[in-house]
Amino acid sequence: MIAYLLASLPTPRRTEPPAIELGTFVERCRGFVSEERWRDLEALLDPGAGSEVGVGTTTTGRAARADERRDRGYDHAASAWRDLSAQIDDAVAIQRGASARRDPAPYLQRPTGYRVDLVEAVEHAFATQHPGTRERALDELRWRLADELAAREPDGFAALYARAVQLRLAWRWSRWDTEAGWTALEASLRELEAPHA
């Protein structure tokens, strides 16, 4: 049944706005997967989910998700993604800690496994001076990892979960534009200036 669902869902592209909303994607999956797997998809595509695709999260949010993971099991594909995403997040925390001369330990998730290629890819991304280029490189790494996850089970839940990861990345990229960047910068500057006014 999942193979039918995959065939009926649009495939996200890195360079194009997605053809399906996140909420619509989750709802279309409901009758095709178990309740537990559906909750995994819903948690991934929840806009407040933070770093499930490496977008960033707070230490408190990370701890809450760790508690939730202990309370209920995750599908192997969702667990594999969480570990890969956490490895990227840890490598990013180490890079940011090094540049800011701060201890990254409070921000580390310490996932299962360790992939040297992920650490090297994050180091390569941080060698770039432009933050937008860095974020694109990190998201391209995430996209590639989602492809690897899908290859484990091309007609099964791993492929569906990987498509959800890529959909979330595609939506993130579609929201990046110059006007939004200037708006965010102006809001940040106003925040910084407010205490001094």
Image (cartoon, rainbow, N blue to C red):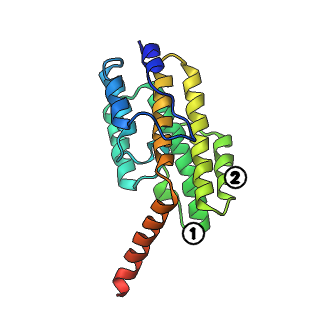
> Where, quadrant-wise, is the N terminus in this rendering?
top left
Q: Amino acid at mark 1?
A: Ala
* Secondary structure of residue under mark 1: helix
Q: Is residue 96 left or right of residue 36?
A: right
Separation of residues labelled 1 and 2 (CA atoms): 18 Å
Relative height, residue 31 to residue 17 (above, below): above
Q: Residue at x 41, y 77 (%)?
A: 192
What residue did someone put label 1 on? 100
Which percent across, then down, holds residue 173?
51, 47
How packed mark 1 is, by other alpha carbons closer than 10 Å (few <14, some 14-19, many 20 or more), is few
Q: What number of labels is visible? A: 2
Which percent across, then down, holds residue 181?
49, 62
Which percent across, then down, holds residue 100?
57, 69
Q: Amino acid at mark 2?
A: His
> Where, quadrant-wise, is the C terminus in this rendering?
bottom left
Q: Residue at x 55, y 18 (%)?
A: 154
Q: Quadrant of residue 22?
A: top left
* Secondary structure of residue under mark 2: helix
Q: Quick check: can you spot residue 40? A: no
Relative height, residue 58 to residue 114 (above, below): below
What residue did someone put label 2 on? 124
Q: Nearer the viewer, mark 1 or mark 2?
A: 2
Q: Quick check: can you spot residue 176? A: yes
Which percent across, then down, holds residue 141?
61, 42
Q: Residue at x 47, y 62 (%)?
A: 179
